[in-house]
Structure formats: C-alpha cells, structure tokens
Amino acid sequence: MKTDKSERLFTEAVEIIPGGVNSPVRAFQAVGGSPRFIDRAEKQYIYDVDGNEYIDYIGSWGPMILGHKNEQVQVAVQEAIDKGLSFGAATEIEVEMAKLICDIVPSIEMIRMVNSGTEAVMSAIRVARGYTARNKVIKFEGCYHGHADAMLVKAGSGVMTSGVPDSAGVPAGCAEDTLTAVYNNLESVEKLFVENTGEIASLIVEPIAANMGVILPQEGFLQGLREICTREGALLIFDEVITGFRLQLEGASGYFGIKPDLITYGKIIGGGMPVGAYGGRKDVMQVVSPVGAVYQAGTLSGNPVAMRAGITQLRILKDHPEIYRKINGYGERLRSGLRDLVKKYEIPCVVNGIGSLSCIFFTKEPVVDYVSAKTSDTIMFGRYFNHMLNKGHYIGPSQFEAIFLSAAHTEEDIHRFLEDAEEFFKQC
C-alpha cells in the first residue's frame, strides 16, 4: 500500500498544525505510523491522496449513516448552496428541522440548534444550572461530552487514548463542580447525591458509552438514573451525539424507553456537516434566551446548508425503517463473527456492541466501565489496527472508539472484514 503523499503531507502538517492534525485521534499516535490523508469518499468507501481505497468503518465518527455522497443529500445541499451559504437570520428550514425532531423524539418538546456536540453539551448544562439554580454536575468516568472545560474530567475518546484523563489549561474552578461517578454503578451515583444534597443541577450520561469503546448500560442502570434524578430534583441529560438517530430513529431514549429532561445531538442531524442541537422539556427549554435568562447564541446556528443536509437525511431514515434493520443486522453479524474467531483462536478479547455500533477490546475481562476498558492491551490493538488498515479496512485509530456501519455497507464487506480479522488472529 503506497503512502508517500500522506507521509509527505503529515511531515508538512506537523510544522504548522499542532501534532499535524486538527483533532488528536487522527494523529495515529495510539497505533503508530502516519495518518492517511483522505481525498474523497463515496458510499462505503474512502480514498486517500495516494489513491488507496478503504472500506470506511468510521463514517465521520457516526453521522454518515446513509454512507458517503448519498444522492438525495447531495442534491439537497447543492440546492441550498445556490441560495447562499449563510444568512445570520431566521430561515424556514430551521423551523422544519425543529418540527421534525420534536415529532420523532417523544421527550423533545422544544429544541435549539447549535454548531457541534461540544456546544450542545455546554449549552444543555448551562440550561440545567439556570433551571435548577444549582451548580454541580455529575458525569461518568470514560464518558466523553466534548472539550468544554467542565467536561474534561476523566473523559473518554481521544483524551482516554492519550492517557491524559484531564486537560492542561482548564482552571480548577471550571471543573470543581463536576463530579464523577462509575458507569453502570448506581451506588456511586447515590453516594454523590448524598454528599452533595440539594447542590446537583444535572446528571449527564452517554446512554450507551461509545467513547471508551462501546459499553452497554446494564439492566436497570438508565431507569435507576431517571428515578434518582426525579427524586433529587436534578435534570437527566442524555448525550446522544453518537446514539441519536443511529441506534434507532428515536435514539437511545426511544430504544430504552427512558425520558430524559434534555438530549444533546451532534453532526448526525446535519448529515455529517458541523451541526449540533439540544432539546427537551418545554418548561426547561424556556429558560433559554431570548425567552429566559440563560444566554446562548451562535451566528452559524441553524446554518441553512447544514439544515438542508440534515433534514434530508432524517426524512430518509424516517421513511425507510428498513435501513435500521439492515445496519443493525450487519452489526450483529460482525459481532457474532468476531466472537466466533476470538473463541476459535483463544484470543483474550471481548466484543461489545449494539445495533450498528461495535468494538473489540483486547482484554480477558468483561468491559462494563472505564476501569475495565482500561485493562485493554492497546499494543495488541495497534497491531490489529495496522493489519486491518493494510487490508483496506479504515477503523478508528484507537482501542476506545466504535466501529460504525452504514446503509452503504454490504454482506460482502462484513465477510471480507471477518476474513481479514481471522488472518490476524491466526498470527497471534
């Protein structure tokens, strides 16, 4: 596999961009080697600047649920561009998008568009504090909620990969009201509420923890969080930047039958373009300016091009429920195949996942939280990653990221993935 141009670009990039990349996990530091510089994408494939073709299992970290360059989305974006790129004013498409999401997700009565998942989380937490007149927030070890100061406390995703649980440059005062609990452990949550009676504004959780690999909530965990928050007068926030409109149309809240007070979304509602949103109960959302006293603004919020891309994708998903049956079926086929292989070759691995989200952990023990995820052999994962990359499979360059499937993937793609994974396991 030729990589000359990617390597040359990376050499140039490290001189003018920190680490040579604009988001840390792209740097390949956790797996070795130089990152591939991507030139274009189509359906389930991406192509790098050296002309190499890969089956893409990242999908821009989740939003390309229809695959790359979906024809209907492309046409919609081109039509929107013809009208202008940005107005900084209200548009009809924003109203259409808000109505569609409120129609799809039962727990959302009002919604506000922003520009990223990070911004959505930051805003939702501010709303929770404004609504409750309390300051403290509970998050879970290993759950990633963007790079806002208050959330970089035992975070997942790229922060977890680098081995740095917090970030320099975050003043102690910004994080002192952030409390951390153990995912899948209700006792740790109860303890924090007892120790901080009447002070906790909200609890934020990835209903499926997808930034420390993929970790499912154990039976009763999410319901327990709902009951605790209701009892204590704190708002329950579901971070559905990963699971929203991917796990199923109604997201994790619909899948598990839990009604959070607020939900945050990311780029999936923009068809992969830079978009985010937060929404929930009407009485909570009405504390947001200009109606209420909680200020939040954004010049590019509700950008008409991104809204058109997103609403087109969401309407396709709404009109074609068979898409979820297809991608979830492929996900189960991938996981069962991997489980068969690790059993056959007696490899110390755990395969987690649900629907179209999957992850293989190189560890012997069940992975149910941050501590058990960290037992993974990241050196072994690096070997696995590079083997699969050289075979033409583009997966996340970190042990702690998910595999994402799209409607563009095929049975043959899954078969090829398992064949090439078996070749790796044979060598172990």
Image: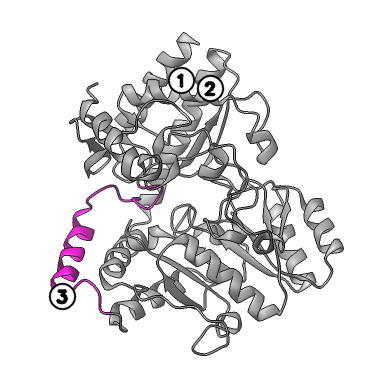
Q: Nearer the viewer, mark 3 or mark 2?
A: 2
Q: Which disc, if any, is residue 325?
A: none
Q: Badges 3 and 2: C-beta atoms under 8 Å apart?
A: no
Marks 3 and 2, Cα distance to the nearest angstrom? 50 Å
- Neighbor class of circle 2 (other Cα within 10 Å; few <14, some 14-19, many 20+) is some
Q: Which residues are magenta?
A: 60-87
Q: Residue furthest left?
A: 82
Q: Which residue is mark 3?
A: 83
Q: Which secondary structure lies at badge 3?
A: helix
- Neighbor class of circle 1 (other Cα within 10 Å; few <14, some 14-19, many 20+) is some
Residue name at image x 35 percent, y 50 percent: 65
Q: Which residue is mark 2?
A: 379
Give the residue type that dot 2 points to: Ile
Q: Residue 195 sits in which quadrant?
A: bottom right
Q: Is residue 231 visible?
A: yes
Q: Is residue 250 visible?
A: no
Nearest to N terminus: mark 3 or mark 1: 3
Q: Which residue is mark 1?
A: 383
Q: Nearer the viewer, residue 195 or 344?
A: 195
Residue name at image x 55 percent, y 26 percent: 378
Q: Which secondary structure lies at badge 2?
A: helix
Q: Badges 1 and 2: C-beta atoms under 8 Å apart?
A: yes
For this view, does 406 lie left or right of residue 123? left
